[in-house]
Image (tube, grey):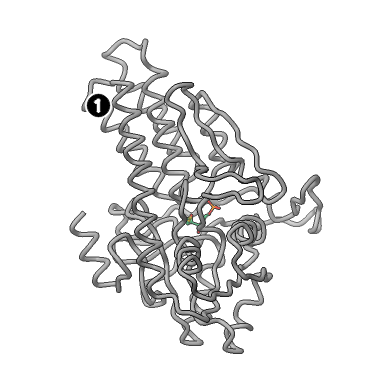
Amino acid sequence: MKIKSLGLENIKSVEWDFEKNHLTLIDQRLIPFEVKFNQYTTVGDICEAIKTMVVRGAPAIGVTAAYATALAVKEIEDTPLCDKKEKLEEKLDLIQATRPTAVDLNNYSFRVYQAALETNFSVEESFLAARRLCNLVLEECRLICEKGAEIINDGDTILTHCNAGPLATVDYGTALGTIIHAHNQGKEIHVIADETRPRLQGAKITGWELEQEGISHQIISDSVAAFLMSKGEISKVILGADRCMKDGTISNKIGTYSVALAANYHTIPFYSAFPWSTIDKDSESIDEFKIELRDSNEVKYVKGQTEEILVANPGSEVLNPAFDITPPNLISGYITPSGVLNQEELINEINKK
Ligand code: MRU
């Protein structure tokens, strides 16, 4: 990732330092006002960073959880061997409970847990397993960018929702990554970024990343999207996913379903981009999807650079689901590391895994 305004290149939003033994996260809560790197050395503090969204975006959370699990193996180093599995599982539960919808977190932390069991709780092997998963996400995102850019045409105006750029995926990005790649190929693209209430990931993070990349864009309030579609001003929708079920049903940032319905009504192609860590192979129906409910203050207050401002009636109750669910009949294609797939091709790929 390039942070051109600071002259920084090859920056990752999540990075374990193998010499200093700490995790560095870019504090995404402060973007676009400040680029701050936070260091973490305990599982408890990393869990707090995931919950409070210092780190966000399904793949970035997944990699963070992988390193947290490796750190958990280190934290139980002095526990007697007979108790180690139980102690590690306690920490794994804490890590997996931080954010319930983004399945990458469960998939990647579980794979490091398995690596620990297979290597007799080797700290070194657990960290190496986490690093392999980090490299895997990076490689898969790179492929998503390349393959997704193929469906982007010169002159496209693309609507995106929330943020699926380099910060959300350690580097490269998924949905936004395809746009960045197409832009770097010389295609003229204009991006419409939904502001994405209540946390404003679109207005704050997507807007900032697009500016860093020099990509033409406009931020809209979420309710403008359907109007622009009705006027023929959107040529395609590309966004990410936090969970994709075996049949191609996706869960993504709240508002995605409304965008999908509007795009379908106006026959605008709608794509979801994600790496294989976002596949949920276990859920049999959407009733098993855990939709994260977040704090009411996220809706009642708007967070600016220095202060939070109350923007709702203080005495009203709030409902704040962080994600919604979009069925496959509203999805034109899935942008994956194996290419842009239709529902049947996606199901075949999932079954091979
Ligand atoms: O709550 P967030 O900001 O973690 O939600 C992120 C999203 O919904 C993204 O669209 C998704 O994680 C894909 S990130 C590549």
Q: Is residue 5 above or below residue 187?
A: above
Q: Is residue 137 above or below residue 193?
A: above
Q: Is residue 4 above or below residue 206?
A: above
- In this view, the residue farthest toward the left is 352
- Judging depth in this view, the residue of 189 and 302 nearest the camera is 189
Q: Residue 284, percent across and down?
A: 29, 59
* Side of 304 relative to 70 (left or right): right
Name the residue located 42 percent from the left edge and 41 percent from the top edge: 63
Name the residue located 27 percent from the left edge and 13 percent from the top edge: 81
The residue pinned by badge 1 equals 117
Name the residue located 68 percent from the left edge and 45 percent from the top edge: 30
Quadrant of the rendered structure where residue 124 is? top left
* Side of 285 relative to 49 (left or right): left
- Secondary element type, mark 1: helix
Q: Which kind of residue does numbered mark 1 sit on?
A: Leu
Name the residue located 20 percent from the left edge and 59 percent from the top edge: 351
The quadrant of the rendering that contains the C terminus is bottom left
Q: Residue 320, percent across and down?
A: 62, 56
- Judging depth in this view, the residue of 72 and 217 nearest the camera is 217
